[in-house]
Every structure is written in structure tokens, then in C-alpha cells.
Amino acid sequence: MGPAVAGVLITLIGTGGVFAVNSVSFAVVLVGLLTIRPQPKPAGSERPPWAGAGVAGLRYVAARPELIAVFVVFGLVSTLALNFSTTLTLFAGRVFDVGSRGLGLMSTALSIGTIAGTLVATRRASPKVRTVVTGAVLFGLCEVLAAFMPTYVTFLALLLPAGFMLMTLNTAVSAFVQSEVGNAMRGRVMAVYTVISMGGAPIGCPVIGWVSQHAGVRWGMASGAGAAVLAALAVALWLSRQRTGARPPAQDPAPVQDRAPLHDRPPLHDRAPVQDPAPVRDREAPVLLPPAPVPTPADPYAPDSTPTGGTTP
């Protein structure tokens, strides 16, 4: 909303007054930073050394194809397509001749789209690479269509979906990076994200300005957006090939024993009878022996039957 407010204030207090108001706004940020109380350092914890931190972050990104794809898409869009400070000024001054107030309305339309995109992005689940690529392609297409709109009103109408898709892309990239990177490397990777998001403008703005000077303002805006769309599609194709090449080759299943088709099998009455299984060998029956006789004790009162040589008196 800042550019929109600035466009209105320029017509009221002039350009110098807008710069003065903007300088006062930084005081609020400074006061907020001074009121932040850092948490005490836990006992026994050591801060990792900063030497080589940037190189470690780049190595971490280089080892993950999905992060490479997201950063390449976002970097090209930030460099070639996010040049509204240059393109909107040229459209307001050279194409539609609407002055500073018309430039403020352009920024307002773009800001309304970004606010709507932010509200919708809060309801979205964890984004994927597909979300980033889709947002980049749709944003580029909206910008290309806006570049060739014949009237100022239709140009404003196309800035609304362009701002919507721009914020969809920004939130998707930021959420993907923070959710897919571990706690130990998140700060270093976010530093790479910040450099990519803000470091492309010094390169892209002169290029878009040169194209606008030699080929026209409309072609300057459309060329940057079209290049971003083609780059997003190329990165998506590269990532799909990377995923396909990383999959292990499918192995052939084990051969199944060939069986005759049902129509080639003989009917049931012509088939050979099923033979009984071989009889189990009979076991010999165990021989049962009679129990051994148990001796009975002698009766002491029974007459002695043992013959003797004498006679009984």
C-alpha cells in the first residue's frame, strides 16, 4: 500500500513532502527494534562459527534439486518480471499519460491484488514446487496481457490478478523454504532467499529499461514477464526429469509357470482319473506278553506236604 499512498500524497504535498513523511516512518521501525529483548543464552550452548556459513548454505541448497528449482524460478521472476518501479512509471508517463495520480492508482490496483493473494495464501496448506511454478507462470501471463491492454482501465483491471498471483508466488516460496529446511540451516538458506529476492533488481531494471527504450514500453514489460514464464516451464521440465531419473528401474516380475488356456484344456470326463496316493506302510503290531505270575506267601498253618522218611507217632 506504500506506493498507492505515496501517489496520493504527491498530488497534495509534493515529492519532497512525501520523502519527509517516509523518513519519519523509519523512526517507528527503529523504536520497534530497540524494544526487542533478546533471549538469554542457554548455559553450555555454543554459537556456531560464522566462518563458512554462507558457503554451507549454498552447498545445502545445491544438494537439493527442489530448492534449486524454487530459487531459480523465483530469482528469474524477481530479476525480469518484478520491475514495477520502472514499468509502471513508464506506462504512466509515456503510454497512458496519467501523471503521478494515475501512477498511484496503478500501485493501488496492484496492492489490492497482493492483499487478496495474502488472504488466500493463509488458507493454503504446505506449498509444493508445483505451487511455485504455477504462480510464476500465471503471474507472467497476467503481466504479458497487461502490457498489451489498449486502455488505462483495462490495464488497471489486469494489475489486480497480477498482484494476486505475485503474492501467491512470494508466500509459496517463503513457506516452502522455511518448511522444507531444517532448523540448523534455515537461517542460512533464508539468507540465500533474501539475496535472490532483492539482488536481481539492479540487473533486471537496466535490462528492462534498455528494451523499453529501443523496442517500446509494452515490449519491455512483456519481454521480462515472458522470459520468466519460459524459465519457470523449463525448470519444471528439468525437475520432472530429475525425479524420473532418480527412481529405481522397475524389475520384471518372476516368471509364472505356463499353463494351458482354458479353451485348450480337455473336458473333465476325458481327463485321466486321479490316482490314489501310495498306501502308507503298515506298522507291525506290538507283541503283548502275559503278565509275570506274582508269588503268594506260604501259609504257616498248612500241613507240611514234604515227604519224610519216618512215621508220625
Image: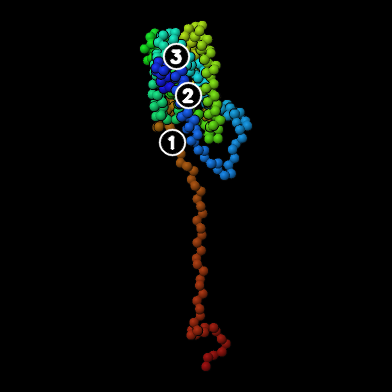
Mark 3 or 2, nearer chain start: 2
Q: Tell me which residue sits at (60%, 31%) in the image.
A: 53
Marking on residue 221: none
Mark 1 or 3, nearer chain start: 3
Quarter occupied by residue 14:
top left
Q: CA distance from mark 1 to mark 3?
A: 93 Å
- The residue where tag 3 is placed is 88
Q: Nearer the viewer, mark 2 or mark 1?
A: 2
User: Mark 1 Cα within 10 Å, few/some/many (few <14, many 20+)?
Assistant: few
Q: In the rendering, at what x and y percent does residue 203 appear?
A: 55, 16
Marking on residue 273: 1
- The residue where tag 2 is placed is 23
Q: Amino acid at mark 1?
A: Pro
Q: CA distance from mark 3 to mark 2?
A: 23 Å
- Determine whether label 1 and label 3 are within 8 Å by CB: no
Q: Is residue 279 visible?
A: yes
Secondary structure of the residue carrying numbered label 3: helix
Q: Which residue is more in the foreground, 165 or 163?
A: 163
Q: Tell me which residue sits at (54%, 32%) in the image.
A: 187
Q: Is residue 130 visible?
A: no
Q: Tell me which residue sits at (37%, 15%) in the image.
A: 157
Q: Amino acid at mark 3?
A: Leu
- Determine whether label 3 and label 2 are within 8 Å by CB: no
Q: Nearer the viewer, mark 1 or mark 3?
A: 3
User: Mark 2 Cα within 10 Å, few/some/many (few <14, many 20+)?
Assistant: few
